[in-house]
Every structure is written in C-alpha cells, then in structure tokens.
Amino acid sequence: MRILSVLLLALTLFTGPLFAQSDLDFTTFSDLDKLSEQMDGINNAAHASMNVLDWTDASGPTLFRISAGIFVGAGSFPANEAVGLTEDGYLPAGLGLQAGFGTMGFEAYARFFPETEVQGLSLQVLGFGLKYELSDLIPIPAFPALAVFADYNTMGFAINDSRDVYLDNGEKAGTVDSGIDLKFSTVNIGAMISYDLLLVRVYGKIAYDMGTTDVSWVYATATQVGQVNASEQSGTLDSNGLRLAVGASIFGIKAEIGTRSGSTFAGLGYGLTF
C-alpha cells in the first residue's frame, strides 16, 4: 500500500503541472491523417520513456538473482497549440512496479502499474523483458559487462474532459464530452554495457524501438447555437526510433537520462537485488 501511495503521488506530481496550463484537445480533427502530424510530440514523449530503467545492469547471474523495485519516468514534448499544448512539458509514460528473476546468464523482468485515475487522467502500464549477458564471449580481463535485451511494454493513457465548441463567428455553440484514449505499445531491441566503480554502477544503452499508438478521440462540429454534433474517431500510428540512454545506480537508487527521435527522457527508481 505504501509503494502504491508513492506511485500515485508521483503520478499526481507529473500530471498536475503537465495539464494544468495545457488543454489537450483533438475535437477539431476529423480523421487520423489530419491529426497524425500533430501527434508527433506526444507520441515520441510516450515511447521515449516507456522503457525507462528497464535494465540497469548488463551482467547476467550464473546461479539465481531476484530483483524488485519501483520506477517513474517521463519524456519531453514541445508546445503545439494545434492540439492545445501551450507549453513544453513532460508525459509520465514510465511508472510502476518491476520485478525480475535471472539464472544462467539470462534475466527476465515484468513491470506493472494498475489502471489509476487522477484528476480526470488515467494511466496503466504493463511490460516484459529478457536479457542475456555476452561478456563470456569477450576474453578480455576486467572488460565491462555486456548484454543484449528485448522488451515489450504497453501503456494506456486517457483523458476524460469536456470542451466548448464554437461557430465560425466565434460564438459558443455548446459543450461536448471530449475523451481522448491513447494506447502505446513498443518492442525495444538493443544492447547495454555496465561497469561497477566501487559503490557506483554506470551504464549505457542503445536500442531500436518499434512502436504503435492506437488513438481514439471525439470530433465535434456545430451548425448553430445549441446544435453540437460529435463523432468517435480512431486510428493507429507507427512510431519507430533509436534510443540512447546513460545512467547510474548507487545503494539501490537508479537514475537514467536519454533521447529518442528528438525527445529527451529521464527516469528515477529504487530497487533491491537478492
């Protein structure tokens, strides 16, 4: 319960400033072709941080290793008044609990955050990953740990709100429920290297993300005052990109920063390994 409380607090802290001064609105877009270009910033922000803190150690256990922790992360998006983003901001795409198990050089993890609604915003996360250490194939003494990995992560992000609809002359015609539902999924394939310096572990990662985004929203038009027509619109966008990240961990505290397709991301977590 205490861990979930911390995560809920983190979600509130991220999403509060994110949309307090920004009013995400897709109601003026009649189809995905018109919306897709305006979605680039949010799309990159989400996919950039979905895999944050997936791996912080390239070594693979020879016997058994169990890990558990919490993490939170966000990706940056630029201002875009066409969809109501009046300022640059961060999308909290990385958030949840993570547990891992490893043996014989392999390590697997699962991450999870239950569907939770805060201030009209809802978020849920689910992911899996597998890693294998390659260091034994490199016969160089004291060579840093090297591994390859693959992840599959998903995130659902929804906004429940209402929007005013106006006539061409600027007169308000009425109000419409303007929910936006975004479902992100990504396959992340890459390699990482890590090295222990006394108490601190430093690491770097490179990966290629193959992502998709399912979008559902409300398109609204008005013909006269009191006459607002609303229709459900939906579609799927592709979002592929190269991820680069560096990070460090000490006493179980893990921090990571990186970039993907022009969007920067950062993550912070705490975990224990047995």
Image: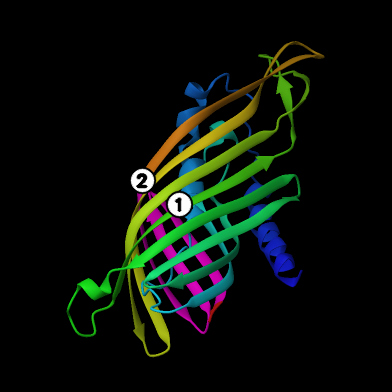
Membership of 267 in magenta stretch: yes
From the top left corner, tell me how far across and down residue 175 is, in percent.
78, 25
Q: Residue at x 47, y 63 (%)?
A: 54
Q: Is residue 13 left or right of residue 79?
A: right
Local SS, label 1: helix
From the top left corner, tell me how far across and down residue 216 is, in percent.
61, 30
Numbered range of the magenta stretch: 242-271
Membership of 139 in magenta stretch: no
From the top left corner, tell me how far across and down residue 219 is, in percent.
65, 21
Local SS, label 2: strand
Q: Residue at x 72, y 22 (%)?
A: 165
**Residue wearing tag 2:** 241
From the top left corner, tell me how far across and down residue 267 is, in percent.
51, 64
Q: Residue at x 66, y 53 (%)?
A: 15
In the image as oriented, which residue stretches furthest toward the top?
223
**Residue wearing tag 1:** 48
Q: Is residue 257 visible?
A: yes
Q: Is residue 92 visible?
A: no
Q: Is residue 172 above or below residue 250?
A: above
Of the numbered discs 1 and 2, the one sitting upstream in the chain is 1
Q: Is residue 241 above or below residue 59?
A: above
Quadrant in the picture for the N terminus: bottom right
Q: Nearer the viewer, residue 23 or 122?
A: 122
In the image as oriented, which residue stretches furthest toward the right?
226
Q: Amino acid at mark 1?
A: Ala
Q: Amino acid at mark 2?
A: Gly
> Residue 29's quadrant in the figure?
top right
